[in-house]
Image (spheres, coloured by chain):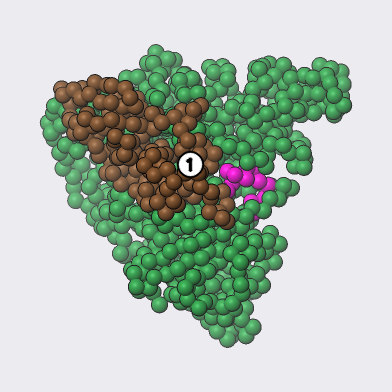
Chain colours: A green, B brown
Amino acid sequence: MTALVTRREFLQGSGALVVSLALPRHGSAQRAPDGYQALGKPVDTGEVDGFLSVHRDGRVTVYCGKVDLGQGLRIAIPQMAAEELGVAINRVVLIEGDTALTPDQGPTGGSSGVMRGGVQIRQAAATAREALLRKAAERTGKPASEFEIVDGVARTKTGGPDVPIGELVGDGRFELKLDPKAKLKDPASYTIVGKPLPRPDVPAKVTGRHVYMHDFTIEGMLHARVIRPPAVGAKLLAVDETSIKGIGGARVVRRESFLAVVAGDEWDAVRAAHALKAHWSESSELVGQSAVRDWMRAGPFESEEFLLRKGDVKQALAGASRRLAAEYYWPMQSHASMGPSCALADVHDGKATIWSASQATHKFRETCAKMLELPPAAVRVIYLDGSGCYGMNGHDDAAADAALISRTVRRPVRVQWMREDEHGWDPKGPPQLLALEAALDADGRIAAWRSELWLPKATANLPNMPLLGPQAAGIAQPVGITTGLISQNGNPPYGVAHQEVLVHWLKDSPLRPSNLRAPGKVANGFAVESFTDELAAAAKRDAFEFRLSGLSDPRGIEVLKRAAKMLDWQPRPSPGPGGIGRGIAYLHYKNNETYVATAMEAEVDRGSGAIRVRRIACAHDCGLIINPDALRQQIEGCILQTLSRALHEEVAFDRSRVTSVDWKSYPILTFPEVPEIAIDLVDRPTEPPLGAGEAATTTVAAALANAVFDASGLRLRTVPFTPERVKAAT
Amino acid sequence: MPVFVLHVNGVRHSVAVRDPNEPLLYVLRNRLHLTGAKFGCGLGQCGACTIWVDGVPARSCTLPVSAAAKVSVTTIEGLGTPDKPHPVQAAFIAEQAAQCGYCATGMVMTVAGLLARKPDATLGEIKDALAGNLCRCGTHQRILHAALQAAGKSKPKGASA
């Protein structure tokens, strides 16, 4: 089904709500019960009305600045709000990432959806509940402390009088500051949080009725395709517009080196993009894939920084009985979203409405306003589900493309990237190089540890990643790169007395980078937990016991023990007798968030170099669990996606361009490779809820490399673990 | 403009196209407003656009509309609805086998196509049938469990979900 908005409705500036009314009944969250009235509501994070509306009929709309990218916020956030307010889950409607309706809660990333976004909304709901109890008290003359709200009805704890909360607010506003001290419910009384409630969007997703960004259309829109240069940095010299003559009215849109075609019919736009003759300058400004490691060592560097200096590492290394050193490398990887990025924009009469699958609609709104030279208030960005992305893929680029073209042609424009655009031009996870050195004492414990990291430095306070469209069009943008917090978890959590972590901050990245699921930590965890295994093996100690003996945090100890138990781990040094190998890895995400341990069984065929993963067991502690089934699914996703990254993925590029531009040249995990996964959740209802979208990723590559070593004695230190690398390993 | 008569989900459509090589996927999505089949690669490599041609799973992104005129086409919309899902869709819902869900309709079409031919397919056969369907979110285990459930089989012992 295609959602349609008429031009007239659209010009009234009511795009999202009309659109949402046209959405299929089962489809999307983007439908406020009070429709148009919601426009103009507060979007301040300090106001209860920013986050919540209680409607006369007892329904509650939750306005969430974070968005569901497939990670399950669409059920988790309503669970948190419903629980705290005291309403049934099916009375809650969620609106996500619409800049006109939702507060700016920051981008959806860094495992912050529940941990920060949900917690903020929970506090708004707690504030609202206290206000509702006061209103009930005023109405009945009984003290507020005697009331509770159950199933949307305020009543005294001894029973009656029943006052539905919809009557207490009656579609009005709370006009109340969010109270950071509003009392939260006792987790022991929870009836909604902690339940494995199904996601509301799954029925529509598996029946083809869910309206994705890619499925969304509005009346009068044109289809566009952007033609990227054949080489990064190439300039457009000439365009032969006659080359697309006769292709269904397709025409060229150009501004400096920004080149696109538009047509009323999508296939005409595709054909025109193929047929268009354009002349570009030569460019070979890239490092090239094969030279990345040397380039990282050589710089140029922005700075050097000791992240950690504890004890006397130099002396401890010098005086130790046994020293080891190894280098680990994680390559550039793509988000490799299943659907190439897509966006729709309507820019006219000093206003812009952008429909986007952006993870950061509020941030993009500022960017887009600058690009279009409009005040931010004149720009509205409305979130629609995209194909999954795991940091920042091409969604924002596509939205900028659409806005630029729409402004030029004065029509609504839908931009759909092609496969080679997404693989070729999505911002990539940056490369990481780690040189590790450590010493064992006479008792086979880690006496000293030194990490040296070579990492692209994220530009401080960069308002947004430079986008392709404005860059090509010669529109000024802030200069710099984004990578996420990539230097965390660069040292072992095993109580080593003498440690240091030194980062060589690179000024740039070989290709435009962005955050990619567990940025940095995925590679640091691989290196640190693999090297820990090397030390255990050198000490002829069991890998699990080696870690356990160094851990003091009881929550860390618990997940490590549980992961080992799931694989029926029998202590012995690695490598094992051959055949099936086992490996384990542990990480405390960002050193202050989720605890996770993963154990794995794998076999290695030395002849072909093939690795077969048999079984994966993961124990996970992210504090209070909001929805255990949605949580399991996030952990499964972390595990399988990282298995894919560890086994298969590396962006190929030469001096001019990315050359891995389809699924053959950039393969990902396939079904025949999928192992059995078991997950053990540690629920800690009295602890704060932490993120789960990234933590488990950080243990996967090391657990696999350690299992490969246990099976074969081969140590893999470079991702991906291709058959060629396995055959070359020693 | 050439006109092609298509039979989609049991309904006859006449579609005029400028280019007989226009892939069926574009016609389904833009002319017939059947957007359940997704554009993933346009190369027949990912399976997001999977439909049935005469009951057999096929890639609509590489199938020219001219070649689709002589066959019976079934799309995800022809299988079931959120209220009345096909048994495979019901199993996907029961197993919560979608994250972003962009690949989900292709998965359902492939699994339902397999089970229509082989109702008691084994886990290995299901994995092989899905070998050309890619999922990026890591929903594979759920999809396999849903397929097993639809085939009347139990999940492997020890798996979590």
Q: Which residue is mark 1?
A: B150
Q: Is residue A626 magenta?
A: yes
Residue A454 in percent (x, y) is at 44, 64
Residue A159 in percent (x, y) is at 85, 24
Residue A641 in percent (x, y) is at 46, 53
Which part of the image, by quadrant, shows the C terminus of chain A? bottom left
Total tally of numbered discs in the picture: 1
| Residue at the image position 65 percent from the left and 69 percent from the top | A548
Question: How dense is the environment of label 1, judged by Cα within 10 Å: few (below 14), some, or many (20 and up)?
Answer: many
Label 1: element kind:
helix
Query: Would you say residue A461 is visible in this rendering?
Result: no
Query: Would you say residue A95 is visible in this rendering?
Result: yes
| Residue at the image position 36 percent from the left and 69 percent from the top | A609
Q: Is residue A466 above or below residue A707?
A: above
| Residue at the image position 71 percent from the left and 34 percent from the top | A84
**Going by the picture, which residue comes out furthest to the top?**
A8
Which part of the image, by quadrant, shows the N terminus of chain A? top left
Of A246 and A379, the residue lying toward us: A246
Q: Is residue A206 magenta?
A: no
* In this picture, residue B78 sits left or right of residue A173: left
In the figure, residue A344 lies in which quadrant? Answer: top left
| Residue at the image position 52 percent from the left and 37 percent from the top | B93
Of A596 and B89, the residue lying toward us: B89
Residue A86 in percent (x, y) is at 72, 30
* In this picture, residue A26 sits left or right of residue A682: left
* In this picture, residue A140 sits left or right of residue A641: right
Q: Magenta stretch: give its range.
A: A620-632
